[in-house]
Image: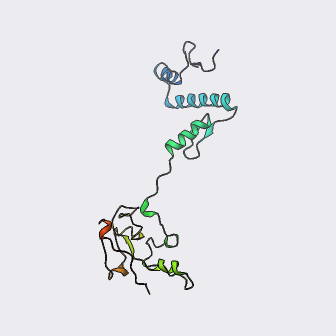
Amino acid sequence: MNEKIMKCHLCDGYSTDNRSNLIRHLKDVHKCSAEDVFELREEIKKKKAERATGGDLLKCAECGQTFAVKKSLSSHISRKHRKKPENPAEISLFPDQSDSGSAPKADPELPEDMDDEEQDARVTEWYRCSNPRCHLAVHFLCASGHCVACQSSFEPHPDEDSEPSFNLDSSDDDMPGPSTSTKP
């Protein structure tokens, strides 16, 4: 006899190879309650777990639902308990600035004993996202024209308002080269 054949434990006349059919039979013919149906489902799962792994049911740590095989538990977790995506506005690209929630307002101070190439890195113009909630800093030559976090345009940092500005959405011909003045 096939192990998958399920018989009604309340009457001898009904058997099926489909759990849903057995549950429908119990509800329709025997007027079983939801609790009785739940107990039957758990019993079927236990028998399946014993056949498949020889062990007990596997329990979801999040909600307590039980499963007969590991694959069912994994599928349940991936469908029902997905990690929610992080809000891009809450991600800091500046680890040392994570408490303040804003980007640096000026170029970082570099050591005095740097070589010429490092010195050139000090000669730059910095722009930030124009969205007041975001304000991610970006070097204008590296900018795609829009903030990667919120898609707003960029604006010069407040300490650079006196220098010439430009629109990042304009063509490359309109874009000035890097500033040649050094910051104090």
Where residue 49 appears, x then y in whole percent? Answer: 64, 31
Where residue 116 appears, x then y in whole percent? Answer: 52, 81
Query: Relative to the observer, which residue lies in front, 62 or 147?
Result: 147
Could you tell whether 182 is left or right of 41 in the image?
left
Quadrant in which the N terminus appears: top right
- Outermost residue, right direction? 54
Residue 168 appears in the picture as rendered: no
Quarter of the image for residue 43 reads top right
Q: Determine the residue positioned at 59% across, 27% down.
A: 44
Q: Determine the residue positioned at 37% across, 74% down.
A: 177
Q: Determine the residue positioned at 31% across, 68% down.
A: 173
Residue 116 appears in the picture as rendered: yes
Residue 184 vertical position relative to residue 44 in the rendered view, above or below: below
Q: Determine the residue positioned at 33% across, 74% down.
A: 176
Residue 15 vertical position relative to residue 38 in the rendered view, above or below: above
Quadrant in which the C terminus appears: bottom left
Specify how the rendered protein is coloured: rainbow
Query: Relative to the observer, which residue lies in front, 29 or 104?
Result: 104
- Outermost residue, top direction? 13
Query: Relative to the observer, which residue lies in front, 77 or 131?
Result: 131
Where residue 65 appears, x then y in whole percent? Answer: 56, 40
Query: Relative to the observer, which residue lies in front, 131 or 172?
Result: 172
Where residue 147 appears, x then y in whole percent? Answer: 38, 64
Could you tell whether 171 is left or right of 100 in the image?
left
Q: How many marks are shown on the rendered structure?
A: 0
